[in-house]
Structures are given as structure tokens and as C-alpha cells.
Amino acid sequence: MTTTEHSTAENPQQQPRQGCEDVYLNWTSYKVTVSRQGYEQIVTLAQAMSVCHRCQRYYGENNMNVAGNLCLECFLQNDRHGLTFVGEAAPDLINRYHSTNAPYERPAYLFLDKKGYVYWTEAGPGEREEAYEDITATINYWEFPLPLEAKKNGDVVSLRGCSRSIYGNVRTDDIIMLRFWDYHPDIDVLFLAMRHGQSIQINKRRELHRRLFAEARQQLEATRTPGGKYLINGEYQERVYDSDVYCHVARLVEAEQKALRTAWQAEPDAQPATSAEPEESKEDDRNEDDPQE
């Protein structure tokens, strides 16, 4: 059912019709013009009597409309990502476009894949039946800090329009690596993000940061087998990729943080520190925009 709101400004020859809507019955050829009151009743009836277009069953509390005109059960049967249903998405977790032409408010629903990445759907007419993967929502859902700015050649640049990637296990790791990149302008930066904590931009001009990356790569290259392959995370692969290094750096920092925390708890006078943020030095940190090794 589609509707059209009439306006005499668009068609001066048309007679004024205030509060009218066009509805189409089964096909666009079968148009009926109804009053605003009648239209609202039709919308209410359509909501109450809607069924899943695949199984043709009414929606219910345990099998709600979650994506387009699909019920939860049919959506999961058609799902290609191995998603687990979480529930209705919090309004501040995802960034939705709200159409002014939608006949009624359409809820959004949250799903997690096996890695813990967030996917979400929108229910109701006019919406797609596929889930959206959302990296930003994943970072926020698992309560990691999301950097909005970075340093580049001494300037502060915005990361709001950048693509982003996660390196690490968002379900189990307390420290992960985040990468933000864009081509216009040219941005490519890395951050260590600590669950419930802060984020620290990686700067290869800092000795401690360089040492972390060198140590991570050295440990990964030490997994090379006699056959020439590398055994990383229980799987054999042809080479050590940058993504492997990013994940391993985060794990090294997390392991050191835990060791420091244990020592601090054993000795109350000791102060905890972070391996990713060295003491003040005289090193030049103006060029902080090169995450690559």
C-alpha cells in the first residue's frame, strides 16, 4: 500500500483536498483516495493484521517482525552470517535514517555474529530483509572507547567519516586494536582501545611503540613451521599479515597490563602503568599518522 499526500501547490489545477491520502489496493492501478481519518484506520488495521510474507503467519511477542516483512524465525532461517538475536536495538547504539514518509514507527533489532560483531535490521514495509554490519555499534556495544579525533603531522583530524576495522576478540579481549583510514583526506591511524577505559593512538616515532610492534612480529614469525607456513591462532597461513601483528600487539599490552595490575595489588605502594604510553621523552611525535610497519 502506497500513499500520496495531496498539495495544490504541486498542481494548481487540482481542487483543494485537505487531509486526503491515496492508497493502492494490491496494485498501483487500483487507487483509492481516502480521508486522513480513514487512512489512519487503514494503517492501524494493516499493523494489526500484518503477516510474514514468507510463512504467512501473524507476528507475535515471541516471533516479531524483525526485517522488512519477515518474522524472526524466517529471517534466521535465511541468515547467512550465523547471527544470534539480542533484542530491540537501543536508539543511541545505531545510526538510523528516519523517513518522513514511513506510515508508522519501525523498530530496529540487534543481532551478534559468532565473533561478537553487531548486525541490525529494520522492520516493516519498505525495509530490506538483510542485516547491516555495524563496526561502530560493535565497538560501543562491547564498551570500548571510540576515538573521534587523531593527530596527523601536528594537526588534529576528525575520524568521523573514516572506515574502521577491529583487531582482536571483542568478546574476550580487554584491549583491542582499532584502525581508522580514509583516502580523501589521507588518514591511516591505529589506536589501542581498552574496555571501559581509554584509547591511545599508536605513534611509531615513540620507542616503546616501535618495540611493541617489533616484538609482536618477531613472536609471530617464530611460529614458522619446517614447511614454511606460520601457525597463528591455531591455523596455518602463508605469511604474517599486518592484521596478525595488530592483534598480537593488543594481546601483549593486555598481558603486560594484567601482570602490572597483579604486581600492584601485591604491593600497594606500586603504581600501575600502561605499556602503550611511555614516560615523557624528547622524541619527535609530530608524525603520528603512519600505522604501517
Image (cartoon, helix red, strand yellow):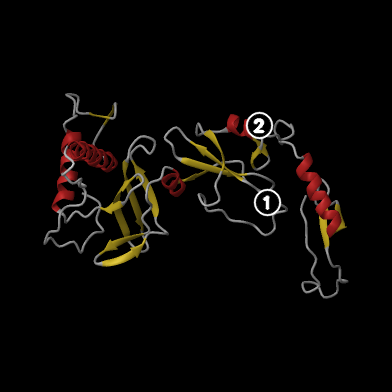
Please say if the residues under marks 2 and 1 sit with CB atoms less than 8 Å apart: no
Query: Which residue of the protein is positioned furthest toward the front in this rendering?
Result: 268
Could one spot residue 24 in this view of the protein? Answer: no
Q: Position of residue 15 (x, y in %)?
A: 88, 71
Residue sitting at the far top: 226
Report the residue at 67% width, 59% height from top: 100
Picture residue at 16% right of the left edge, 40% below the top: 215
Q: Amino acid at mark 2?
A: Asn
Horizontal relation, residue 221 to residue 108: left or right: left
Q: Nearer the viewer, residue 120 or 260?
A: 260
Which residue type carries mark 1?
A: Glu
Give left or right: position of 150 versus 21: left
Q: Residue 163, position in %: x, y?
A: 40, 53
**Residue 272 in which image quadrant:** top left
Q: Earlier in the sequence, mark 2 or mark 1?
A: 2
Position of 37 with respect to 89 (left or right) is right
Q: Residues within 10 Å of mark 1 (few under 14, many from 20)?
A: few
Q: Is residue 260 above or below residue 159?
A: above
Left or right: residue 116 versus residue 15 is: left
Secondary structure under the numbered disc 2 in the rendered image? loop
On screen, residue 209 above or below 283: above
Q: Which mark is residue 105?
A: 1
Q: Could you tell me if residue 151 is visible in this image?
A: yes
- Please, what secondary structure does the residue beneath circle 1 have? loop
Number of other residues with Cα within 10 Å of mark 2, as a class: few under 14, some 14 to 19, many 20 or more: few
Image mark for residue 62: 2
Residue drawn at 19 percent across, 40 percent down = 264
The picture places residue 10, in percent across and down from the top left corner, at: 77, 72
**Picture quarter containing residue 287?**
bottom left
